[in-house]
Amino acid sequence: MIVGGVLSVLSTNGSFGSCKNTVLNTIPSPDGSRSLVIFRKECAAVVPYSTQASIAPSGIASPADKIPAFFIISGIPILTANWVGDNAIEIAVAAGEKIFRKQDSVGDIKIAYK
């Protein structure tokens, strides 16, 4: 019985702390050089989902796994995001949402929140 318990822990240990990113939307910039990537991070049952946004060069494979998020919000809220020029993004979320990260810029790109 002890051996079975140990094997069970060993077989699930690799997936316990793992996370999966699911891309919800990819919005190309007006000039096509970059993309705004909105994705959901899904981790083990003890870690709540979060919705995140990052800016990636166009054409990069799996940008949600490679580019750090500039915006992170708890759960799966309704999130509206769009480019308002080659170097500006606007993000709107409902009042009262729990925001973990909210940068005002990423490189030369300004980010406005509503």
Image: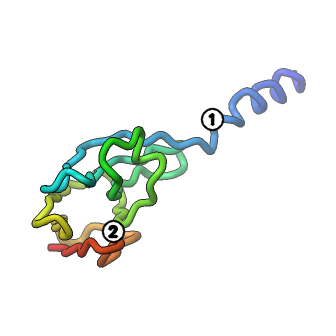
Amino acid tagged 1: Ser
The N terminus appears in which quarter of the rendering? Answer: top right
Amino acid tagged 2: Lys
> Residue 89 at x, y = what percent?
19, 67
- C-alpha span from label 2 to label 1: 27 Å
Q: Is residue 5 left or right of residue 65?
A: right
The kind of secondary structure element at disc 1 is helix
Q: Quadrant of residue 72?
A: bottom left
Identify the residue at image location x=34%, y=75%.
Answer: 103
> Residue 76 at x, y = what percent?
29, 51
Q: Residues within 10 Å of mark 1 (few under 14, many from 20)?
A: few
Image height check: is 106 above or below 48?
below
Ranked by sequence position, the earlier of labels 2 and 1 is: 1
The C terminus appears in which quarter of the rendering? Answer: bottom left
Identify the residue at image location x=20%, y=69%.
Answer: 87
Q: Which residue is mark 2?
A: 98
Image height check: is 63 above or below 69?
above
Q: Quadrant of residue 14?
A: top right
The kind of secondary structure element at disc 2 is loop
> Residue 66 at x, y = what percent?
48, 49
Q: How is the image coloured?
A: rainbow
Q: Which residue is mark 1?
A: 15
Image height check: is 10 above or below 80?
above
Q: Is residue 65 left or right of residue 7?
A: left
- Which circle, 2 or 1, is nearer the viewer? 1
Which mark, by number, is residue 81? none
Q: Most extreme residue toward the bottom, as rendered?
A: 104
> Residue 31 at x, y = what percent?
16, 55
Q: Is residue 53 left or right of residue 111?
A: right
Tag count: 2
Identify the residue at image location x=76%, y=32%.
Answer: 9
Q: Residues within 10 Å of mark 2 (few under 14, many from 20)?
A: few
